[in-house]
Image: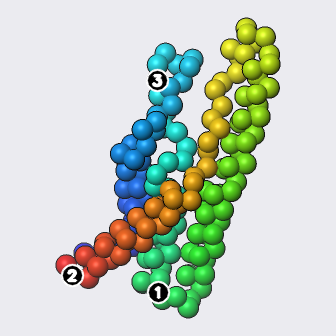
């Protein structure tokens, strides 16, 4: 039975996401109004979205080659995800920081009505590079194992 290729990027993205608590000390954010519950933060090492996108492009390149339309589509998806990881989320973080500065100027009792806003939503370049390396490396390993077995 042949392993469905579309599952490889999903698996790689999940592996990259599961590595984040190992590399990030403050991976979980404690919610102020939730009785001590925590949620995973955005960003962190490695970028799981980048790992997924590089894995998808690697699967398409290894299965279909570099010169076909599927690789072009995978490359466009990769560029959009890289833009989101590096640029768009950083702008959202700046909005969060500006809103937090405004909320602090409110009276104490009114500040309690606003949730905590994250300032760091995007990835740093090393996190994106690590995600790309995880995506390409793990995908290549899985594809090689599929040929060997």
Q: Quadrant of the N terminus?
A: bottom left
Relative to residue 55, is residue 17 depicted above or below? above
- Report how many numbered discs are placed on residues in the image: 3
Up/down of 94 relative to 143, above or below: above
- Looking at the rendering, which quadrant does residue 96 occupy? top right
Q: Position of residue 84 (x, y in %)?
A: 65, 57
Residue 49 in sight from this viewpoint: yes
Q: What is the x, y in percent for residue 68?
A: 56, 89
First reached walking from the N terminus: tag 1 or tag 3: 3
Which residue has dot 2 on it? Answer: 148
**Badge number at residue 138:** none
Tell me how far mark 2 sits from mark 3, CA to CA.
45 Å
Residue 134 sits above or below residue 141 on the image: above
What colouring style does the render use?
rainbow
Q: Residue under circle 3? A: 37
For the residue labelled by badge 3, is the local secondary structure a helix, a strand or a loop?
A: loop
Alpha carbons under labels 1 and 3: distance apart: 45 Å
- Inspect this view and state whether residue 52 appears: no
Residue located farthest toward the bottom when viewing the structure as drawn: 67
- State the SS at label 2: helix
Which secondary structure, mark 1?
helix
Q: Are marks 1 and 3 in contact (CB under 8 Å)?
A: no
């Amino acid at each position: 039975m042949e392993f469905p290729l579309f599952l490889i990027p999903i698996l790689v993205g999940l592996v990259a996401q599961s590595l984040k608590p190992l590399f990030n000390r403050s991976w979980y954010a404690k919610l102020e109004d939730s009785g001590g519950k925590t949620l995973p933060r955005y960003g962190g090492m490695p970028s799981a979205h980048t790992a997924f996108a590089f894995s998808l492009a690697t699967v398409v390149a290894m299965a279909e080659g570099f010169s076909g339309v599927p690789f072009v589509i995978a490359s466009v998806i990769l560029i959009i995800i890289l833009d989101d990881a590096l640029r768009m989320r950083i702008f959202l973080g700046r909005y969060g920081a500006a809103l937090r500065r405004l909320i602090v100027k409110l009276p104490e009792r009114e500040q309690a009505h606003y949730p905590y806003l994250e300032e760091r939503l995007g990835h740093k370049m090393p996190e994106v590079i690590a995600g790309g390396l995880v995506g390409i490396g793990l995908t290549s390993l899985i594809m090689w194992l599929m040929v060997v077995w």
